[in-house]
Image (cartoon, grey):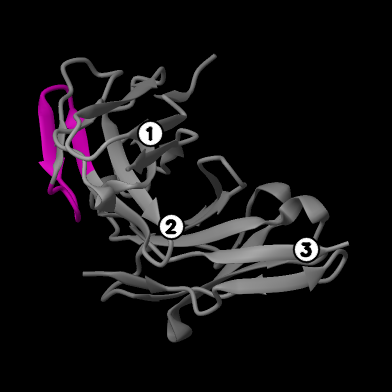
Amino acid sequence: DAGITQSPRYKITETGRQVTLMCHQTWSHSYMFWYRQDLGHGLRLIYYSAAADITDKGEVPDGYVVSRSKTENFPLTLESATRSQTSVYFCASSEGGSNSPLHFGNGTRLTVT
Amino acid sequence: AQSVTQPDIHITVSEGASLELRCNYSYGATPYLFWYVQSPGQGLQLLLKYFSGDTLVQGIKGFEAEFKRSQSSFNLRKPSVHWSDAAEYFCAVAPSGAGSYQLTFGKGTKLSVIP
């Protein structure tokens, strides 16, 4: 089925651990995004990618690393997790222009203890 | 830079009642405007969008929104709410002609529906 898949759905990790959240899309969309959703802050853009091997920072990139070696995958890595990174993370994709709607995955709920 | 304000954090309506969710934006020109809905435990889904032309746009699930340039508003409406409409609703704005990475979301309005 076409769509955007995130894994895992839930993750608990300890402070200081490295954790990678996966995102896979089957539409061949050019753009992919990572957002975090927190109470009181709404959705905030972490990183985005315009194409394979092209990534750029969003509003809140500190503590995160992304890569995009293939168009369909856009993993997000927390190199050394902190409690402030406890959040729900959403991956999204779009065709690119500001008139292109975003297609979201179902999210990963990450808890850092 | 553009910004979006959703003045109501939480709204409760009775099933069958009409609904209006408010959205105000700040942007120098006419932006692209969107409403997304998020059901519990799920990602956001596009309800409707406005780019240009007719200021009243129809979306999925019986929703509509009206763009009012003079008020910098893009309010979402539904004539008769169903229990399944209980969700969180996000208004979003993007500069026209820019990239979708420039989309800015409001903080959302949570809708509760009383049976």
Which is more toward the observer, A3 or B30? Answer: A3
Residue, disc 3: B113
Residue, disc 2: B51
Report the magenta residues as a range. Answer: A47-62
Q: In percent of the image, x 32 and y 24: which residue is there? A: A22
- Queried whether the magenta region covers residue B21, the answer comes back as no
Instruction: Name the chain under label 1.
Output: A
Identity, as a three-letter code, of the amino acid under mark 2:
Phe
Using a 10 Å C-alpha cutoff, classify the residue at mark 3 as few (fewer than 14 neighbours), some (14 to 19) or many (20 or more). Answer: some
Instruction: Name the chain under label 2.
Output: B
Q: Indicate the secondary structure of the residue bearing disc 1.
A: strand
Which quarter of the rendering shows the N terminus of chain A?
A: top right
Marks 1 and 3: in contact by CB < 8 Å? no
Q: Which mark is residue A12?
A: 1
Identity, as a three-letter code, of the amino acid under mark 1:
Ile
Residue B19 shows in this picture: no
Marks 2 and 3: in contact by CB < 8 Å? no
Q: Indicate the secondary structure of the residue bearing disc 3.
A: strand
In percent of width and height, residue B81 lies at: 80, 62
In percent of width and height, residue A23 lies at: 34, 25
The correct choice, above or below, for A97 with respect to A7 in the image is below
Using a 10 Å C-alpha cutoff, classify the residue at mark 1 as few (fewer than 14 neighbours), some (14 to 19) or many (20 or more). Answer: few
The correct choice, above or below, for A23 with respect to A49 in the image is above
Is A64 left or right of A28, judged from the image as shown? left
Q: In percent of the image, x 20 and y 42: which residue is there? A: A47
Which quarter of the rendering shows the C terminus of chain A?
A: top left
Instruction: Name the chain under label 3.
Output: B
Is A52 left or right of B85, judged from the image as shown? left
Which is more toward the observer, B86 or A98? Answer: B86
